[in-house]
Amino acid sequence: MNAKWFTRVGLCTLFATVSLAASAAPPKVAVTDLAYEERVSEYFRNVSASEKSSLRASGRESERESDYGYSRRSSGSLNAKSESNYSSSEGTYSYIDRGEMRKFTADIKGGILKTGRFQLIQGKPFTDAKNNERLYDIIGRIKRGMYPGADYVLFGAINSIEFRQEANPIKSTDTVSHTLSLELVGEFSLISTRNFTIKSSFSATGEGQDVKLLTSQGGRVVLNRGKVVSEVSRSLGADVARQLEEQLSGVYSDGEESGGNNNRPREESPREEVIIFR
């Protein structure tokens, strides 16, 4: 066979393999810290007191002496003034507190990595405390270059986070079940950095609890708050990864994303183009 034939076949196979590897490259995703927004009410009491006083005194004295007699006159005045003010006010005022919770995202990233569908990119944290209204302007944050190199940004915001501590007697025993639980609900959106479209959107939940059984004479109970938070983080990460898997078709069906690469996860065998020179 002609040596050119082998060379052409090898080159065609190499190009097909490289093309397939490029098309199967997973998109790059940046995961934001979880945003939160809550109304905070605070009690205030203001007390103001002031005092002002003044004292003014004047005097006059005169003497007169002549061959016929002697006289002496004196006069004076005293003017005192005092003024005091006192005021107090109390009540409550409310304001909106916004920020990012720098917890729970490690397990979200870990769950996403386990899927094998994405590469993770480290983005820049939101630090503009003076303009915290921009926290939810994810498109503006993308345009400001906070996620360099990312094809997508997974933006998450906390909807609800609630601790509960309960003590429930167990029937027909002198034992009490003490429970500390935490439930976190968040909303997530996968946003394209190329055209700002939302490729995936869902709610995810994380739950955790610590339970201890003590008799009525058991003394003080100490529940493990760290264990509860750790369980919530793991379950939230697993739920986020699972729902991303379910909605991946919205990402991989768009070949023009990520600089024109076709990001379909399906596996294909490279094609060999055979040309025979006669």
Image: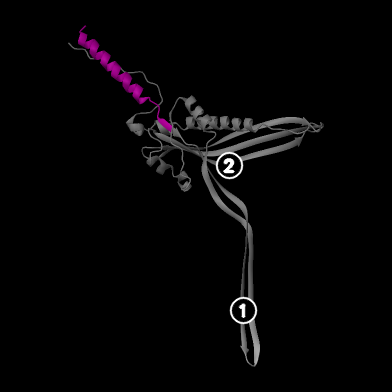
* Residue under the point 34% across and 24% down: 22
Q: Nearer the viewer, residue 9 or 55?
A: 55
In the image, residue 74 sits, relative to residue 40, either above or below, namely below
The single residue placed furthest to the bottom in the displayed view is 68
Q: Which mark is residue 104?
A: none
The local crowd at label 1, few if under 14, some if 14 to 19, many if 20 or more residues have their Cα within 10 Å, is few
Q: Main secondary structure of the magenta part?
A: helix
Q: Is residue 35 left or right of residue 68?
A: left
Q: Which badge, 2 or 1, comes first in the chain's sequence?
A: 1
* Residue under the point 58% across and 49% down: 40
Asked which secondary structure carries label 1, the reply is: strand
Q: Which residue is mark 2?
A: 160
The x and y percentages for residue 241 are: 50, 30
Q: Is residue 65 left or right of residue 238?
A: right
* Residue under the point 64% across and 33% down: 225
Q: Nearer the viewer, residue 13 or 42?
A: 42
Q: Amino acid at mark 1?
A: Gly
The local crowd at label 2, few if under 14, some if 14 to 19, many if 20 or more residues have their Cα within 10 Å, is some
Answer whether residue 272 is visible to the viewer in this image.
no
Q: Nearer the viewer, residue 192 or 69?
A: 69
Which range of residues does the magenta coloring cover? 1-29
Q: Which residue is mark 1?
A: 59
Quarter where residue 80 is shown? bottom right
Alpha carbon distance from label 2 to label 1: 78 Å
In the image, residue 62 sits, relative to residue 19, either above or below, namely below
The x and y percentages for residue 229 are: 60, 33
The x and y percentages for residue 140 are: 40, 44
The x and y percentages for residue 258 are: 36, 32
* Residue 243 magenta-highlighted: no
Q: Quadrant of the C terminus?
A: top left
Quarter where residue 268 is shown? top left
